[in-house]
Amino acid sequence: MSTTSTPTDTHGTAAVHVYDTTLRDGAQQEGINLTVADKLAIAPLLDELGVTFIEGGWPGAIPKDTEFFARATKDLDLKNAELAAFGSTRKPGTSAHHDTQVRALIDSEAPTITLVAKSDIRHVERALRTTGEENLAMIADTVAYLVGEGRRVVLDAEHFFDGYRYDPDYALRAVTTAFEAGAEVVALCDTNGGMLPEWVHEIVSTVAGRTGPQQILGMHAHNDSGCAVANSMAAVSAGARHVQGTVNGYGERTGNADLMAVVANLDLKLGMRTLSNGGLEEVTRIAHAISEITNIAPFGRQPYIGASAFAHKGGLHASAIRIDPDLYQHIDPRKVGNDMRMLISDMAGRASIELKGRELGFDLAGQSELLARVTTRVKDAEANGYTYDAADASFELLLREEITGTRPAYFRTESWRAIVDHSAGPDGVMRDVAEATVKIHAGNQRVVSTGEGNGPVNALDHALRQALATAYPEIEDIELIDYKVRLLDSAHGTDAITRVLIELTDGQHSWSTVGVGANLLEASWEALVDGLVFGLLHAGVESL
């Protein structure tokens, strides 16, 4: 079993254990349903990230978690992290050796066992329906038994902060009992998520003073007060050397502490080593890869790793960033595997356009006349309803047109139309059938194509793709993955101007375009055309 002394790095700076509970606590989030295969796919990513512990689930209580541990021993080859099994202390009135749930933790073959134990006397008496002394005996017996079986033990002191504020003496006894029985770490849990940083700092400082520097205290924060990351930082500053949380802050209710933000703060702001193997530079990529498995879209404004975390829109920002990026960024985004982005909008000045051009591969330095034209065109377009901060592909096509004098094109549109037939079928049920016809000139021939879909826009998309497929087989790789509509000047009701934003992908990259028109179909057609043109352009297809 590892030593319980506080770990330090080679420079003497205190290191912090990073305990990931995405596979258990994170999986309790509404909308997440991880299969065993999902967990086996996520665990290697967490190991690559360089966390200290990966909590795999509750074997013996949840069948698929039992299966996960059975397969993990054969299928996982962890290089950096240690697998932890989660479970509870023995039941009242029995022994740890004879408790089937405790036995299942041993059978999981996990080298680390994390026990959840009551530390709030109200929960002991009302939920467990036992005495305070019996609860302490449950903690001591179970921890000692598992340590005797050669396991490292982390004890999660459930509802600790609420319990401490109600009865500090009992909450402290739960902690000291666990340490005396051989627990390596006692994690203090803000299970209800209602604490504030100064409360956490004060309580953890007191507990650290009672337990001594040789014992490792941890912090497990929920985000119900919006303070999970701040509370984790406050606990570390007060003496905790073990932080628990989840990738992307997954978890029930409002989630857990977002480990991505916690480790970045500890490492980059406080100089405390957290991840092994240089994992900090991989947090953005790995967090997004896990998002794909959970099927929860990444949050664009997530600190450090969100797509908008280092996105700049204001013209004044751009002017300063052109001189020194650090003037408007709290860190170099490359340290967390992210990148700076310039957003083009009606707030943009010439500096924004120049930097965005550089981002897209165009050197616009010194081209004041071109910058002035593009800036004016962007401002005029946005005044008419366009938005380019969420449509980089449309802006690039605009920029290429201003640079070369010609907008990239792969076909000429003769006409298009879409109809929706609302009629009764043979069974008498009313149904909508959408049909679209496009007439274009592509590949030195005139093409007429008709497509059907579950709506007029979908039908237009199908018809246009069919028309282009013969001349440009690369079109088969392009897929529409998101579609957003907004009515502008909504006071005009059904006569309002419509803006459409669409996102497409070729399986490796994604891009967004914008269309504005007097109606939904006109705006959608413009966005679709731009999206397909951009996709063909970046597939290396030569334009007309």
Image (spheres, rainbow, N blue to C red):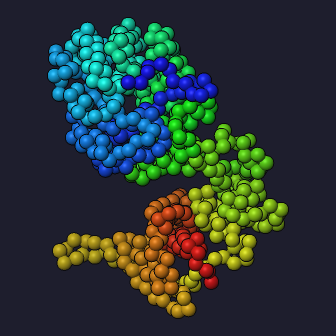
Placement of the N terminus among the 4 image quadrants: top left
Q: Nearer the viewer, residue 350 or 235?
A: 235
Q: Position of residue 150 (x, y in %)?
A: 31, 25
Which residue extends farthest bottom?
Answer: 445
Q: Is residue 2 above or below residue 36?
A: above
Placement of the C terminus among the 4 image quadrants: bottom right
Do we see residue 520 in this rendering? no
Do we see residue 13 in this rendering? yes
Indicate left or right for 533 with 59 as reference.
right
Q: Is residue 53 above or below residue 527?
A: above
Indicate left or right for 420 with 515 as reference.
left
Residue 435 image-quadrant placement:
bottom left
Q: Position of residue 21 (x, y in %)?
A: 39, 35
Number of callouts: 0
Residue 222 image-quadrant placement:
top left
Residue at 63 percent of width and 45 percent of height: 333
Q: Position of residue 350 (x, y in %)?
A: 77, 57
Residue at 73 percent of width and 50 percent of height: 318
Residue at 25 percent of width and 30 percent of height: 105
Residue at 72 percent of width and 42 percent of height: 326
Q: Nearer the viewer, residue 170 or 41?
A: 41
